[in-house]
């Protein structure tokens, strides 16, 4: 048994773009052949993109994906075997992995563990499979599985390992959230060492609506050590040499698998032996693992870039207030789209401080983006005049605050309509949580860049922007000033909300962890604060449902990840 060279084709597929995806697959096979690989792994549902959602209810789409797979198969030469994702139709629909070599589809494996929690909905579309195939190649056995299959200690990987596989190859579409990569690596390392097998995990990369797939494909050796790691948030072809004999040695020395028996015998898919020329060993590449802030920044950049690129947009517009949220949103947009594709609009009112304007101008200059200044005073005065009779005798209140925000939203949408720019809304997760935004005002727009970034993380990621840029791109005064919506005289966020150091942990406990009020209070927070915040979160559900889509970076984002009823009388009882 000699070395087996695998290539992990971490490509950025696009949902629905069957032929574009097939072209990318074919290109990756060419590069893998050039690199001397015998085995190529692709991401899950490579042909359709992931997740295709209700496109899977269209027979024409399913058919086109099958044609795409066949077309791809015809391009795969002898001497190389590919594991590629597609949707199989065989009486019912299956999330599948095709084993392809020498122009033919040799096997169709049907995913067994269909995730149906968090952001996943696979039971809605697929029937679960039942096999556990192994490719026999060069005297070694390679077990095939699809994403969620390997997240369980049992399942196909176990059956394959117990039946003698030395490599477990998993094709995946595992979406990003902060620190998930480390969790994934721990889990995969345990699979490798428990089974005494190499684990080859090829993950999708790219943005798809609110999801970002981080790539971060990896290879673990039979002792559970990381031997190769691909780039995060970029396409990559990761090449590694595996030595199946090491799996045998590991199992002879650590014979735990011997005590277990598989529930079923895996089927063997033989690929013709080919005798490739001797090649020099490749040095496996281990890309560095970034900091949490660095990772979140790159996730936001990729999510925004792919949303624009995959939907056919190039330019963005946003309101620049001199505050931290719009500053970070602008920084992400510049990294994603280039400074020439971002316009910042300054829309001062009588409440806008000179410092806000100066900071907004400095930020735009630092990032090299165009600005326009459109004061909102005339429109605000006109509204006041128009509503004078209707509001007669009534004091100014939040109505007037929101009017300013709505005037700004209208201006941005007018620029969007006129020039085809997409409006970026700038609300962060803390604000989204408690409804601290104006409906049809600052929450208006096409894409909400930082909607899943809590305010404290907004600061950390903003510091990271300056660190990676190597200078003070986001002015220190923006980073240091107290947050204010500037919708009335001397307004501060803390007039309506507890400080973010208190607010954010309470929100995380309630929203991401579903902790109860008494549990949150017991962890050291004031009961009145907790009750008020929980009430605000519950009441703001209607607002979040109307918000633009934006990138998931936390363990639980609003949207498909957290589905709360709007009409909801549940109130936790006082204990
Ligand atoms: N359950 C429900 N289902 C459907 N609609 C519902 C609803 N409850 C209220 N509504 C509607 O929503 C309206 C209230 O929402 P909305 O008009 O947005 O206004 P509202 O939530 O009352 O006020 C917005 C707050 O956000 C603050 N703000 C605004 C802008 C920017 C920032 C910032 O710092 O970033 C902060 C502002 O200072 C103010 O305190 C109601 O008048 C009603 O029409
Ligand atoms: N004077 C302004 N000029 C342009 N846009 C503005 C102005 N004031 C508010 N906006 C827009 O409305 C959004 C919400 O305002 P808000 O003041 O809450 O956010 P911010 O200034 O970015 O950050 P912070 O919440 O820290 O103040 C801003 O991010 C910005 O897009
Ligand atoms: N596509 C999948 O099966 C992904 C499920 C997996 N547990 C994940 O979060 O990454």
Image (cartoon, rainbow, N blue to C red):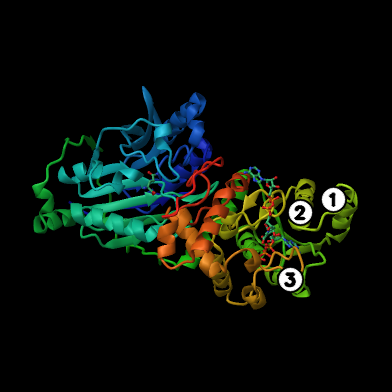
**In this figure, which residue is indicated by the disc labeled 1?**
391
Task: For the residues labelled 3 and 1, say whether their Cβ atoms are less than 8 Å apart.
Answer: no
Is residue 491 left or right of 37 when viewed as pictured?
A: right
The earlier-in-sequence mark between 3 and 1 is: 1
Q: Going 15% across and 45% down the picture, which residue do you hit?
A: 162
Is the distance from the Cβ of mark 1 to the nearest ligand 1 atom less than 8 Å? no
Q: CA distance from mark 3 to mark 1?
A: 24 Å
Is the distance from the Cβ of mark 2 to the nearest ligand 1 atom less than 8 Å? no
Tell me: residue 504, above or below residue 209.
below
**In this figure, which residue is indicated by the disc labeled 3?**
490
Q: Quadrant of the C terminus?
A: bottom left
Task: For the residues labelled 1 and 2, say whether their Cβ atoms are less than 8 Å apart.
Answer: yes
Q: Going 34% across and 51% down the picture, which residue do you hit?
A: 201
**In this figure, which residue is indicated by the disc labeled 2?**
399
Q: CA distance from mark 1 to mark 2?
A: 10 Å
Q: Going 52% across and 67% down the picture, which residue do you hit?
A: 502
**Residue 469 in picture, x, y percent from top left:** 58, 72
**Residue 143 in picture, x, y percent from top left:** 25, 43
Please tell me in which quadrant of the rendered image residue 495 appears: bottom right
Q: Residue furthest top?
A: 91
Tell me: residue 83, above or below residue 328.
above
Q: Nearer the viewer, residue 360 or 289?
A: 360
Q: Residues within 10 Å of mark 3 (few under 14, many from 20)?
A: few
């Amino acid at each position: 048994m000699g070395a087996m060279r695998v290539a992990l084709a971490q490509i950025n597929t696009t949902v629905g773009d069957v032929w574009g995806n097939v072209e990318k697959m074919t290109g990756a096979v060419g590069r893998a052949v050039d690199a001397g690989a015998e085995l190529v792994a692709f991401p899950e549902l490579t042909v359709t993109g992931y997740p295709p959602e209700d496109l899977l209810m269209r027979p024409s789409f399913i058919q086109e994906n099958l044609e795409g797979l066949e077309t791809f198969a015809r391009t795969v030469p002898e001497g190389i075997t590919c594991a590629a994702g597609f949707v199989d139709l065989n009486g019912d629909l299956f999330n599948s992995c095709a084993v392809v070599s020498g122009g033919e589809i040799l096997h169709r494996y049907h995913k067994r563990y269909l995730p149906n929690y968090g952001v996943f909905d696979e039971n809605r579309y697929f029937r679960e499979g039942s096999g556990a195939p192994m490719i026999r190649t060069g005297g070694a056995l390679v077990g095939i599985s699809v994403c969620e299959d390997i997240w369980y200690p049992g399942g196909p990987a176990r059956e394959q390992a117990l039946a003698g596989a030395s490599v477990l190859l998993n094709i995946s579409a595992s979406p990003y959230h902060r620190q998930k990569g480390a969790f994934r690596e721990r889990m995969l390392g345990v699979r490798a060492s428990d089974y005494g097998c190499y684990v080859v995990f090829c993950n999708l990369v790219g943005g798809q609506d609110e999801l970002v797939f981080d790539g971060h494909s990896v290879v673990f050796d039979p002792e559970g050590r990381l031997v190769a790691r691909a780039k995060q948030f970029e396409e990559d072809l990761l090449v590694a040499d595996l030595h199946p004999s090491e799996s045998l040695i590991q199992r002879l020395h650590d014979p735990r698998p011997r005590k277990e028996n598989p529930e079923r015998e895996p089927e063997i898919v033989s690929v013709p032996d080919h005798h490739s020329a001797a090649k020099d060993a490749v040095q496996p590449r281990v890309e560095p693992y970034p900091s949490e802030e660095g990772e979140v920044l790159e996730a936001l950049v990729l999510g925004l870039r792919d949303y624009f690129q995959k939907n056919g947009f190039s330019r963005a517009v946003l309101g620049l207030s001199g505050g931290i949220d719009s500053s970070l949103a602008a920084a992400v947009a510049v990294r994603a789209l280039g400074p020439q594709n971002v316009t910042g609009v300054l829309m001062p009112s009588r409440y806008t401080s000179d410092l806000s304007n100066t900071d907004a101008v400095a930020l735009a200059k630092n990032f090299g983006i165009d600005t326009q200044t459109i004061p909102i005073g005339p429109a605000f005065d006109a509204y006041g005049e128009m509503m004078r009779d209707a509001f007669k005798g009534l004091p100014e209140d939040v109505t007037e605050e929101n009017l300013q925000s709505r005037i700004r939203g209208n201006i941005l949408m007018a620029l969007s309509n006129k020039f085809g720019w997409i409006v970026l809304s700038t609300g962060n997760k803390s604000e989204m949580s408690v409804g601290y935004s104006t409906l049809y005002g600052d929450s208006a727009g096409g894409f909400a860049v930082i909607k899943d970034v809590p305010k404290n993380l907004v600061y950390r990621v903003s510091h990271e922007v300056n660190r990676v840029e190597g200078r003070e791109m986001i002015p220190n005064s923006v980073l240091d000033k107290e947050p204010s919506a500037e919708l009335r005289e001397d307004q501060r966020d803390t007039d309506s909300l507890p400080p973010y150091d208190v607010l954010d942990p309470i929100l995380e406990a309630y929203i991401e962890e579903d902790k109860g009020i008494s549990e949150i209070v017991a962890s050291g927070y004031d009961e009145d604060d907790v009750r008020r915040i929980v009430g605000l979160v519950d009441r703001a559900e209607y607002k979040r449902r109307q918000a633009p889509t934006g990138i998931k970076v936390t363990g639980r984002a609003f949207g498909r990840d957290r589905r709360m009823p709007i009409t909801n009388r549940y109130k936790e009882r006082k204990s």
